[in-house]
Image (cartoon, rainbow, N blue to C red):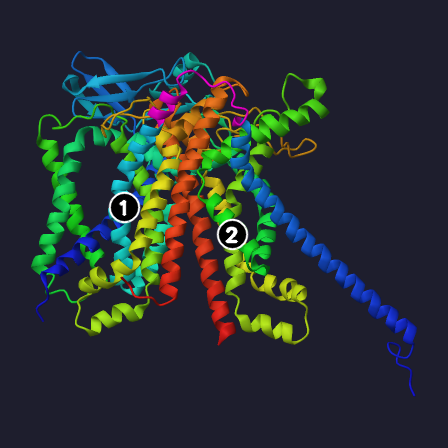
Amino acid sequence: MPANPATCDRFLSQDFVRHAARRRARRERLRAGLVLAGTAVVLTGLLAIPLYLIGALLPWPHLPAEIGARLGVLLAGSARAAACAIAVALPLGLATAMFSAHYAAPRLRAWLKPGLEILDAVPTVVLGLIAAATLAPWLKLHVATVLALLAIVPLALLAAGMAFGARVRREGWLPLWLLPLLLALVVAATAIAARSEAPAIVPTMPWNAALVGLALGVAALPTVFSVAEDALFLVPRAQSQAAFALGATRWQALTTVLLPAAGSGLVAAALLGLSRCLGETMIVLMASGNTPIGGFDPLAGLRSLSAELALGLPEAAPDGAAWHGLLLAALLLLALTMALSLIADAVRERLRRRLRSGGSAT
Amino acid sequence: MRRSSGDAGAWLIAGLAAVSLALLLGLLGLLLKAGLAPFWPAQVDEIRLRDGSVVLGEIVVADAVALALRTSELERIGGAYRRVPRDEIAAQSQPPDADLIVLDDGRRLYARGDADALVAQAGGAVSSHVQPNALGFFARVAAAMRGLAHFLGSAPVASNLEGGVLPALIGTVTLVLLMSLVAMPLGVATAIYLHQRRGFGLRLVRGAINQLAGMPAIVYGVLGLGLFVHGIGAGIDRWFYADRLPVPTFGSGGLLWAALTLALLTLPVVVVSVEEGLARIPAGLREGSLALGATRDETLWKLLLPAARPALLTGLVLAVARAAGSVAPLMLVGVVKLAPALPLDGTFPYLHPSQQFMHLGFAVYDAALASPDAIRGVPRAYACAGLLVGVVIVLNLSAILLRNRLRDRYRALES
């Protein structure tokens, strides 16, 4: 019988197998340990932020006088900027999401989604630059123009829809056809405004909440869009197809089936957009003027919580009163944004579970 | 077929979608135009006033009532702007023999004929000397390319008003590389953990990561400053660099702390991207491997991870893009307007993690708002912004392409 070197020597082969098994077990343990350790590091690092803030503030240190009033003004500033921004981002984001999920031709949708992803990737410092250097001088002259456009554009679109809507059977590429109309409206409005002697409405300050809102709205638009689009897309296609089979138009299917089914997802989109607006720093820092002003005037300047942190912390001595006041501001900001995104997550989770279980869309 | 008037609502939605589209296109167009404009060679104008005097310079602002010109900066940079009311102008021309001389310290001189005398009067070495009005189109394009190359490849002069952005570029790249070295292994480990676990551990870790992904960037900066710089950094200084105190070594903002802060900021991006890649691998592949007798561990490391390599790359690219664009946390942990030395250079140990650094995104903020010469600052800020957005868009596009390729590959595996 020929000798097989691997099997003939029982001791050698057992040894070999045992060694290999032990080596493998050791390697598996090592890898599992590394994975666990990495996860632990990540969790510690991420949880360190709330823990650090709470830990630094727990002994209840000496805070600057009138910290409550200061935080109140900053919070009001953040809220005013976020309100202006969400007024821009919400209609645009939701409408774009509805169009993309329900109307858009597949090829347009294939461009629209990455396009808005790119918009999301534009660094906010760049949006801040555009707001501060280009948009601010323009807005100083054109507040009335913007207001007029806000009223005219929806009316013009509705009128165009009434006039031509019945003739256009497919809306898949409609936005591209509407672009020239919008452009013409904007050019006409600007030209009319340029002929008047002085602007009809002059903002109180060149850097104001409305300006911040425009830039911040563009920053929050992709967030609102992608969350809302995901929610609308999660609604089973069978539901809207059933509506079509019953004779509904696309618009009827959207308003009677899709929107009620995905409604909580749209609320989540608004909440996440709001959370994004509250936490954003660079745009507010560059375009708000950073004067702490309370009140509700959208044409006055403001100073937000995040801008206060960016401006104040590098100068504050660690463990001084001002430092602790700023940490309190950071904790407030963190609590606000986390509360918003927690609510949004809960809402989305409920929506997902309901749609997956195939429950009725009411 | 007659349809209900409710369909006008569809037009409203399509119109608002068109506004979003217009915002995106307008933004990119504006950045492209304003980002490249500073490199286009300017015209030199000669303006003869009604009182007989002559002004030679570059028109920098023009409105309905007046022109603002930059004339020869004989003393200091940004010190020779002149406002000329339009009704005082008798004649305006662009003489082809007008000289534009840029000095080494960034000052610009405008001359006709007696260029050498003007340079001698200003005092300083000549960096470039052209007659911009005489250039043809292609010569202008060539000059713009040269300007762009100079912008990318040289150091700033005159406190960031002129010259290039090379140190900021190197600072950004070094920072992002250091960040990836920290974020990638940790992020991949967490993604693997999430992939292997079911039940409570999974929900806890994923919930935490989802929550933390939505945290404002500036709060990460607060942690970086409070914990890394003032906590750990000051501790390192007390133990290892006590001889240098009170001058801080690691106890002030620097490259290392900024990289760690950004790593925390980008970890959720990496985790989500890699986990998604692992989850999308067809179940048949995994089951086949297990059926052939491979252990779970072997399946993961020899099959699933290599198959998910594009997802890893996507995570890396998205993290780098996010890190390159975030400025707010850096303002707290060590980015400066002008760093005395590069964080990466030829002297041992080559990488200096405790050093302060310059950053492209911060250069945008600084040039736009904190520049001593706003007329130079804003175009410069746009040039930096154009560069930054260009890099970020290229990174994001490649991530999108990678994701599509991954999807195609899995589809091929499934069929």
Q: Do discs 1 and 2 share a chain?
A: no
Is residue B386 visible in this depiction of the protein? Answer: yes
Q: Residue furthest bottom?
A: A1
Q: Amino acid at mark 1?
A: Leu
- Callout 2 secondary element: helix
Q: Is residue A178 left or right of residue B313?
A: left
Q: Chain of mark 1?
A: A
Image spot of residue A147 (x, y percent): 15, 37
Q: Amino acid at mark 2?
A: Arg
Q: Is residue A10 left or right of residue A260?
A: right
Q: Chain of mark 2?
A: B
Measured along the vertical axis of the image, is residue A330 above or below residue B16? above
Is residue B129 visible in this depiction of the protein? Answer: no
For label 2, the crowd category at 10 Å Cα-Cα, with few meaning under 14, some 14 to 19 and many 20 or more, is some
Q: Quarter of the image holding residue A83?
A: top left
| Quadrant including the N terminus of chain A | bottom right
Measured along the vertical axis of the image, is residue A21 above or below residue A45? below
Instruction: Please check the rendered image and state whether residue B111 is part of the magenta-colored stretch, yes or no.
Output: no
